[in-house]
Image (cartoon, rainbow, N blue to C red):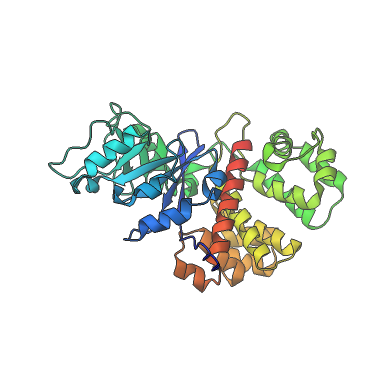
Amino acid sequence: MAAQEPVIIPPVAFDPVANAQNEWVALCLRLQPGEDLPARLQAVFGTPDLLAAIAPLDGLLMLDSPAALTPPVLALLPANRIGFVVSAAALEEEGAPRRLAELHEFGYRVWLDGQAPEGVKAPAALRSVARDCSQDVPPPGRLAALFGPHLARGVNSALRFSECENAGFDWFSGDYPLDPASFPSASDDGSSRRRLLTLLGLLARDADSRELELQLKQDPTLSYHLLKLVNSAAFAVSTQITSFNQAINLLGRRQLQRWLQLLLYARQQPDGPPNLLLPLAARRGAQLEALCKEAGGDRDEQDLAFMTGVFSLLDRLLRMPMRDIAADLCLPEHVAGALLERAGRLGAWLRLTETAPTGQDLEEAEVDPGIWWSSQLNAYHWAIQVGRNV
């Protein structure tokens, strides 16, 4: 019997979708259009890995046309986990309005993306809309009469987020979490982050546990977040941790350093909104660590790769030049080079996590597409768990 050809997973771009409370609610999934799109969709959804990795979030499949949703493709897409964001321009295609209405009747959620072409009427059942809001936004309250949730794409600033919320959008996707105006708040003096940076410095010079515990006790908010984090389901600790000394001893310095790196991005008040930079930083760190491991890196190299990914957003968080941050933390030369100039192998991997890489991008970075896919899924799975537990 001939050996079965391995399934090649095509590049898939993931765009996190958050609600107004800064909680991830879904992931937009984008594949390049083309005649072979149905075959590529079957490759992506033909294994249980994707939906298992992003659970409990839903996937929103971005499509130019419903024509790609052939019966073999739909058989792989459970209506309770996958929705379709379809370009409104597709309504001009013969049979497309009827096909979209049928998808709605089958239990799929369908968002019409953009304005319907002039003279073309959308099916009455389709009342959830999506819009590219990178250039403009509907007037305030425009969407109130329609059934949501409505999706605003291309939300790339804190101001645009506010405008989209006023227009009636419920879900948001874009680079607005990277806008320094989004976080921290004007009332945040940054003291917790300064203590965290001090703690990371103590860990780097192998300070004893008493010094670490003393620094932790100076910040009740930091203490709360650390104990909550190490006891969360995301980290599968078998023993309840109730003290700083126990956290330090049970986790070990290597793991403690990792959690402290993530806590830089934690919400500043226990009842405050989550910081959307946290899951983004966690995803980058986890994916760089996975790529390093696949490339044969040892445990220390994997830790530095994780650190590089997590620290890559500190300039946004702290509103400081990355060069100053790298100098303050005395980072290894190759880590600093990756953060400052995207230099070296770490820098090439980091650049990939910041974009939606094509097959050519992966080839130029010498990253196998299968390894990229598995690292991407594992990283999003972990980031989702971290975001829900911190």
- Residue 88: give x, y in percent of width and height: 25, 45
Q: Can residue 308 be seen in this view?
A: no
Vertically, is 159 above or below 374?
above
Q: Is residue 215 visible?
A: yes
On-image quarter of the N terminus: bottom right
Work out whether residue 86 or residue 297 is closer to the camera in this orientation and state it. Answer: 86
Task: Please report the residue visible at 61 percent of the width from the left and 49 percent of the height from the top.
Answer: 282
Task: Please report the residue visible at 78 percent of the width from the left and 42 percent of the height from the top.
Answer: 215
- Residue 136: give x, y in percent of width and height: 29, 45
Work out whether residue 43 or residue 365 is closer to the camera in this orientation and state it. Answer: 43
- Residue 368: give x, y in percent of width and height: 55, 67
Please state if 335 lies on the left or on the right of 86 as rendered: right
Please state if 167 lies on the left or on the right of 250 as rendered: left
Work out whether residue 63 or residue 203 is closer to the camera in this orientation and state it. Answer: 63
On-image quarter of the C terminus: top right
**Residue situated furthest top in the rendering:** 145
Q: Quadrant of residue 159?
A: top left
**Residue situated furthest front in the rendering:** 1
Vertically, is 168 above or below 365?
above
Vertically, is 368 above or below 67?
below
Q: In which quarter of the image is residue 99?
A: top left
